[in-house]
Image (cartoon, rainbow, N blue to C red):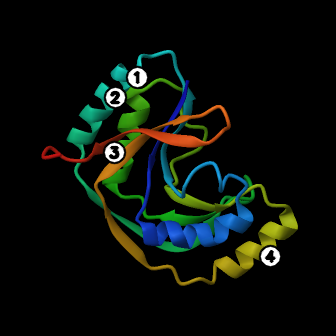
Amino acid sequence: MKYGIVIFPSKSLQDLANSYRKRYDPHYALIPPHLTLKAAFETDMDVNSITEKLEAIAKKNEPFTLNIRKVSSFQPINNTIYLKAEKTPQLENIYEDLYASLPGDPPEHPFVPHITIGQNLSNDEHSDVYGQLRMLGVEHEEIIDRFHLLYQLDNGSWTVYETFRLGKEA
């Protein structure tokens, strides 16, 4: 089975992201706006073993503040446009714990916390859309107190298997 681990932001940030994703992200219907903590991975590992590891990681890490301050792009690597999240030590610790504890390939690229709002754009479309969106004044801050283990359905969409609350008190 294919799994992934994400943070779903607040409804207000999801609404902002979706206002662009509807038009510029072909994965719009497959998964809500999210910040990926561990990219999709396949494993034969028992899901109970995965959830035990995730519970330990969640208990070890405290809730943290997510800050979104601008729109950015991965060009020239690819034509993805995203809401850039500030890379905090807490976010980086969770990311590193997940890659150290769970099966799957090491990350292909350095960790850039983000929420995708457009992808698979042509060069011209990317240039036009990014030129407009990077002028947006994005000022968003929220407390993140959980992450989610997702699994992929046969139709390509993703659904939550279990939610893990951050902190010893969770």
Give the structural element (helix, strand or loop) at label 4: helix
The kind of residue tagged 4 is: Asp
Rate crowding at label 3 as few (under 14), some (14 to 19) or many (20 or more) other CA atoms within 10 Å: few
In the picture, the quarter occupied by the C terminus is top left
Mark 4 lies on residue:
128
Give the structural element (helix, strand or loop) at label 1: helix
Mark 3 lies on residue:
93
Rate crowding at label 1 as few (under 14), some (14 to 19) or many (20 or more) other CA atoms within 10 Å: some
The kind of residue tagged 2 is: Thr
Precedes in sequence: disc 4 or disc 3 = 3
Rate crowding at label 2 as few (under 14), some (14 to 19) or many (20 or more) other CA atoms within 10 Å: some
In the picture, the quarter occupied by the N terminus is top right
Q: Left or right of 2: which side holds 80? A: right
Mark 1 lies on residue:
47
Rate crowding at label 4 as few (under 14), some (14 to 19) or many (20 or more) other CA atoms within 10 Å: few
Q: Are marks 2 and 1 in contact (CB under 8 Å)?
A: yes
Precedes in sequence: disc 4 or disc 2 = 2
Mark 2 lies on residue:
51
The picture places residue 144, in percent across and down from the top left corner, at 32, 58
Q: Is residue 135 above or below residue 34?
A: below
Count of numbered marks: 4
Give the structural element (helix, strand or loop) at label 3: helix
The kind of residue tagged 1 is: Val
Q: Residue at x 54, y 60 (%)?
A: 115
